[in-house]
Image: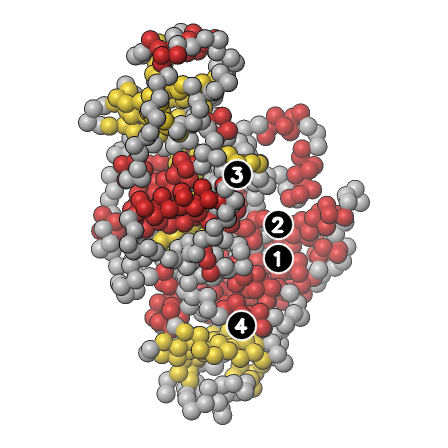
Amino acid sequence: MKVQSVNSNFYQTKKTPSFKRAWQEHISWGANYVKETGKTNFKLFTFPDAKAVFVEVANKLSGNMGKIKERLVSVLAAGGAGAVISSIDEKSEIYPMKNQGKGVFTAENIDAKPEDSYRYIILTQDENVNIVKDPYAKKQENILGWSSVYNQDGYEWQNTDWLEGKDPRRIVRKPNEPLRGLENLVIEEINIPTLSEEGTFDAAKSHVDTIAERGIANAIEIMPVENTFSKQWGYDGVDKFAVNTNLGGPDKLKDFIDYAHGKGLNVIMDMVPNHMGPDGNFLKETGPYIKAEGGYGDLFNYEGKDNRYVRDWMANAALWWANEYKVDGIRFDLTHATGSDYLLKQISLELNEHNPDVFLIAEDNMDNREQITKYHDNVNATHNEKIEFIDSQIDLLQKGWGPSIAGIGYDSEWDSKFKDMASQAVLEPGSNLLGNVERNIKDTRHRVKYAYSHDEIGNWDGTRFVAKNMVMHFMLSNYVDDDGNYDDKDRNSVRGQKAANASQKLCELIVSKDFDKISRADLMKYEEKECGLKRFISKDELINVFKAGLAKQKLLFGLSMTTPGPKMYFQGDDQADLSLFRFFREFSDSRDKRANDPNELPKMWAEKGYDTLEEITRPDCIVGKIKYDGMFKDTPAQMIKFNKDLSNLLKNHSALQKGEITAFYNDYNHNVNVHKLTSPDEELLVIKHFGDGFIDKSYEYFGFPQDSTWEEIFNSDAEEYGGAGYTNEDRKDITNLNQKLSLAPNSFIILKRIS
C-alpha cells in the first residue's frame, strides 16, 4: 500500500550514529522493559534509507500480523504531529521512532508493560508500508503475529553456585583449572519434543533425572528451541531470540536449564546462524537481513551491503543464549553454510569478551579444517578494535580484495570425519577400513567424537542403529517393491525407505513378548504381508543379526569413548532405544497445501517414506516408545550398565580423557585395530575387533608392547552387558610373549599396563 503524503519535517536524520559495541549496545536492541520506570525502550535495525518507523503497542494481542489498514495511511500522513496517535479500530497506540542513522531507529519511555504486544510499521523509501514483528523479539507467541514485551527479570535462578563456578561439575573454558576442560565432556544430544508425550520443558525434567541417575553423560545438548510454528527438530527457527512457546516459552526454558544444573549437568544450546526458516519469516520486509534464498531457507546478509548490524544481530543472539539463559556452551549449526568466517570470528570474539566461561562448538562439516578451532589474538588491541577490524576486512571483501582469516577460535567442532569412519567401519559388511579408523582417531582430541546424531538417524530414514545394521546385513532394499512409478533417484529413495520400514517392523517383532514362540509359517506371513519382503529370513538369522547389531552399537560407543577429548551420543542410544526419530515439522500453511494440492502428500512419501506432520510423526519418536520384552527384555538394562561402566572408566583414567595416542597397529588378517594411550600416570591399550568371528584365547599381534605386563580392565562382550562372555578377566600376565587373548566379534577390550 502506498502512502500518498507525509510530513517531511518528521524525518530528521542524525547523520553520524555514536553507537559502539559496548555491552549496553548489545542488550539495547528490541523491546527492553525498565522495571524502575515501568516503561519500555524499543530499538530496531531496518532499511538504512527508510523514511519512517513506528512502533505499535497493544494490550496482549495474539492475532496474525495482518495487512495494513486504511487507518495507517492517515496515521503516517499525520506523522509529524508528534506524540501518541490512537488507532481507530484496535486498542493500540502508535509511537514514532527516532532515526539515529544507518537504519537504526529508537523509541524510549513508551507505555508498554511485560506481555503487551507490539509490532513495527516501516515506511520504505518507495513509500510502501511494511508491518513486521521484531527480529530481536525475546518472546514471540505466534510466528505470524505480534511480538511480546518480555520481562527479563521475571525468573529467579536457584543454582547460583553453578553460575558462579563453585560447582566442580561445571565444565568451563578456563585452561588453568584442572578437570574443568572440554576433554571431560560426555554429551547426550536431546530433542525436547520427543523426550515425553507432552513435549515440553517441564515434562523433559524426568529425562534429566534419568540422565543424572545413570551417570553416563555430564552434559546435555538441546536441539534448537528457536521459535517455530509447531514442535519440531528446531532447525527451521525464525525468531532467533525467542523460545518456542509450544515447548513452554522462555521462563520454562530457564527453569529447565536451572534444573539440569541442579542435577550436575552442563547445558549446551544449539543455535542456527546459517539460515532462516521459511515459515514466519519477515526479515526481507524488515531490513537488509537477507542475502539470498538457500537450500534450507533464506541466507543472511553477513558480508553484503549494509551488513554490520546483521552480523551484530546474530552475534547478539549468541550472547543472549549465554547471558540470559546461563548455558554452559553453544553449538552452532552448519557453520560453513553461514558463508562468512568473519561472522563466526565475531561471535567468538564477543563470547570471549563478555561470557568467557562459555565454550563454543561448531558443526563445520569441512573435512575438519583446523581454521575453525585455531585462535589468533592481537593482545595489543581492544575488544572494539578487534570487532572494527572485522568491519574493515569485510569492506575490503566488498571491494574485491578477498582477505582471508587466520583463525576463528571455536573450542571444538563436531568430528564429521570420525562419524563417517565409525558408521562405515561397523556397518559395511566385509569392508576393511582399518587405515581409515587410524587416521580419524589420531589427533582429534579437541573435536567432539560421535557416531550418530539427529542427522544420521533422522535424515537417513528415522531408524536407530540396530535397524540400520539389519538393512545392510540382509540388503533389504533388494527385496522390497518400488511400485514402478518413480524415476531412478526416487526409486532408490523409496526402496531405501521401505527397507528401513521393514527392518523397523522386524526389530519390533524380535523384542516383542512372544517372538520366541512364533511359528515359521507365521513369521513368513508377517515378513511378506507386514514388511513387504520378497525373501524369507529365519528366526535364528534375525536373532543373530539383532545380537550383532547390539554388539556393533557397543563398539561404536567404544570408538568414541576411548578416543581422548569430548564425546557425544544421541538420546536413547545409551539404552539401545529402538524408537524412531524421524524428521517432523509442520508449517502454518501445511494443511492448506495438502487440501489444495493432491500431490503434496505423495511427494513427501516419496522423499521420506512417512508423513512429517508433527501430530502424526512425533508420537512415534518418543524416547522408549518401543519396549523390550521376551528374550531381549534385559537388553536396555545391560546396555545402560555397559555405558555407565564405560563412562566411569573414562572418569577414572586420565589417558581416556586427555592422553596421547602414542602407537597404532592394524591387523588386516583379523580386522583388528589397536591404539595405545599414554598419560603421565598410566598406559592403556584399546583393541577393537571389527571381524565377525570368535577368537578363543589365541589372539596375538606383532606390535604388542615389549617388556611390560598388562591386565584387562574392560570388555564389551562381558555377559553382564549382554555379550557371550569372551573376556580375559582375572588375567594379570598378559605380555608380548603371552598374549593369547579372547576377542568376540564386533567387540573391544581395554588393557592397562600394571608393570
Q: CA distance from mark 3 to mark 2?
A: 27 Å
Q: Nearer the viewer, mark 3 or mark 2?
A: 3
SS for callout 1: helix
Q: CA distance from mark 4 to mark 1?
A: 24 Å
Please give the label number shown on residue 468. 1
Q: CA distance from mark 2 to mark 4?
A: 29 Å
Labels 2 & 1 near each other (Cβ < 8 A):
yes
Residue at the image point whose x is 52% and y is 63% from the top: 418
Q: CA distance from mark 1 to mark 3?
A: 34 Å
Residue furthest left in the image: 36
> Can you say whether 110 is above or below 436 in the image?
above
Please give the label number shown on residue 299. 3
Q: CA distance from mark 4 to mark 3?
A: 37 Å
Q: Quadrant of residue 714?
A: bottom left
> Can you say whether 78 is above or below 707 in the image?
above
As rendered, which of 610 and 66 lies closer to the eye? 66
